[in-house]
Image (tube, rainbow, N blue to C red):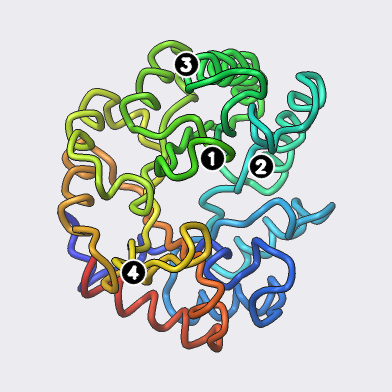
Amino acid sequence: MRDFAKDHSALALNTATLGHNLDGYGAGWSIERVLDACAERGFGGIVFWRRELGDRAIQIGEQVRAAGLRVVGLCRAPYLTGPLALPDREAVMDDFRAAIDMAAGLGAPVLTIVAGGVEPGTKGIGESLKVVADRVAEAAPYAAVRNIRLAIEPLHPVYGGDRSCLVTMRDAVDLCVAVDAPNVGVAVDVYHVWWDRTLADELLRVGPRRIFGYHLCDWLAQTRDVLLDRGMMGDGVADLKAIRAAVEAAGYDGPCEVEVFSARDWWKRDPGDVLDACVERFCSVC
């Protein structure tokens, strides 16, 4: 395993850790201020949310690189199915292509996909997973032309109904196998897979060329909100070193992205203190 105590250049910030993914949260730091603060602390990269960028994707990408950082990825594609998705296939696919275009303009190599929940009018997850696979397969060639990799991120089963019918790494890997496109892979998020005892085997099955991201946070034993009460690394029950060992044993050696949704705790703190905590925890417990 890599020694992050001596080198934390693999550390990347997902701006959700500062509350930038939802209106009304966070301390309101500008993107420029975040970039400067990350560069000062030795972060290697950054991940943005589409809502932050507007029509400035190209400009912001240039600012990231000028600050000595790299764009690691973009969150996210639209929900592809389920009650939170756009109302028809054409609208979904148009927005999917728009997300790919934004990632390309930003210079992000990876666009994260959260599948969306159970398709209205169906029961269980089987039919919804077929819809997801079909729409990812349709988008993959367009993404390839734009030099974008699509990272399918399974979510914790508590989100199965509305946010993600894709709830295990096994199903994510199965989808990759079914789509069979070299730019379609998986993202591993500690929050969503910490409980999955088959994770290591599934990562070996998908292989190093299909692991496109690794996301860090922690699962609090007494979580108060399954969406907005993630823990900072080391504050919860996830075995962070064991998960990273599985990810790296499968061949992943890329960025490690801190993504902490924390409306009642970390989003209320000074962003500089949050970034300091990210560095300290990354070097000590991850």
Q: Earlier in the sequence, mark 3 or mark 4?
A: 3
Q: Which residue has dot 3 on it?
A: 126
Q: Which residue appears at 59% of the width and 30% of the height?
A: 147
Amino acid type at circle 2 is Ala
Instruction: Answer above or below: position of 133 versus 21.
Output: above
| Coordinates of residue 242 in the picture (x, y in percent) | 15, 52
Which numbered marker is on residue 64?
Answer: none
Quarter of the figure that contains the C terminus: bottom left
Q: Disc 1 or 2, which lies upstream in sequence?
A: 2
User: Which secondary structure, mark 1?
Assistant: strand
Q: Please state which of residues 154 and 117 is positioned toward the viewer in this rendering.
A: 117
Callout 1: 10 Å neighbours few (<14), some, many (20+)? Answer: many
Residue positioned most to the right: 55
In this rendering, would 270 be left or right of 3?
right
Could you say where residue 118 lies in the image, as x and y percent from the top left?
Answer: 57, 27
Q: Relative to 3, does residue 103 appear above or below in the rendering? A: above
Q: Mark 1 belongs to which amino acid?
A: Val
Q: CA distance from mark 1 to mark 2?
A: 7 Å
Helix or strand or loop: what does disc 3 sit on?
Answer: helix
